[in-house]
Image: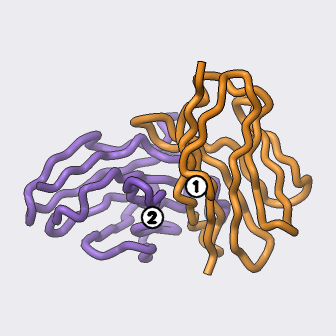
Amino acid sequence: AQSVTQPDIHITVSEGASLELRCNYSYGATPYLFWYVQSPGQGLQLLLKYFSGDTLVQGIKGFEAEFKRSQSSFNLRKPSVHWSDAAEYFCAVVGGSQGNLIFGKGTKLSVKP
Amino acid sequence: NAGVTQTPKFQVLKTGQSMTLQCAQDMNHEYMSWYRQDPGMGLRLIHYSVGAGITDQGEVPNGYNVSRSTTEDFPLRLLSAAPSQTSVYFCASSYYGQGGQYFGPGTRLTVT
């Protein structure tokens, strides 16, 4: 069965530091992969997605993610974190032809001044 | 474009009561879905629909009903609320099969 693992429950980084959030997936075919961000009390916003092609994808708010098939990973990166990036981040994979999403359990990002 | 809208934002129910969570989208998306979010559990799919008149169960469907009479609306019904249904509920929509879903702002439900 398809699954998504986000190994880090909570990460704290200093403002201006670089960020990498890990995501590993289990899926037999070429996956459709997504990163979402959820600010406190808000819904989920799509940051970026990978369907095919270039394995490095750019998203909104200065985020990027790299698809590595050999490692079954889709890690999210940002070169310089801003205080407003503090939120919870979810990785997801499409689990079937209908487009159902399977989510990881999320990584909460805290940003130190 | 309002996107995906949900009502109400907050709701408190007593055990055994029923209610309907409303969801609407104005993007002409075929696919709509309901998730529940619980601490440490991520989002889990309750029910989904790939078009008007077509619905199917997700990972955690028990205790919930859905219907899809129009493309725009996808209400979620709690038949007899239980404390285990205390959660935050999100509705989402997308073009069929693409997975890049747009989410509503959520409904926070407490069952006492």
Q: How is the image coloured?
A: by chain
**In the rendered structure, the residue with mark 2 lies on which chain?**
B
Residue A42 at x, y percent in the picture: 44, 37
Nearer to me, B37 or B102:
B37
Residue A95 at x, y percent in the picture: 62, 72
**In the rendered structure, the residue with mark 1 lies on which chain?**
B
**Tell me, what hue is chain A?**
orange
Precedes in sequence: disc 2 or disc 1: 2
Q: Residue at x 24, y 41 (%)?
A: B10
Nearer to me, A20 or A32:
A20
Q: Residue at x 34, y 50 (%)?
A: B88
Give how far apart the Cα atoms at labels 2 and 1 are.
Answer: 17 Å
Mark on residue B44? 2
| B98 displayed left or right of B71 | right
Residue B108 at x, y percent in the picture: 29, 46
Residue type at numbered disc 1? Ser
| A40 displayed left or right of B63 | right
Query: In the displayed structure, would residue A3 be above or below residue A16?
Result: below
Residue corresponding to mark 1: B94
Asked where in the image residue B70 lies, by quadrant, the reply is bottom left
Residue type at numbered disc 2? Arg
Q: Residues within 10 Å of mark 1 (few under 14, many from 20)?
A: many
Residue B36 at x, y percent in the picture: 38, 58
| A4 displayed left or right of A28 | left
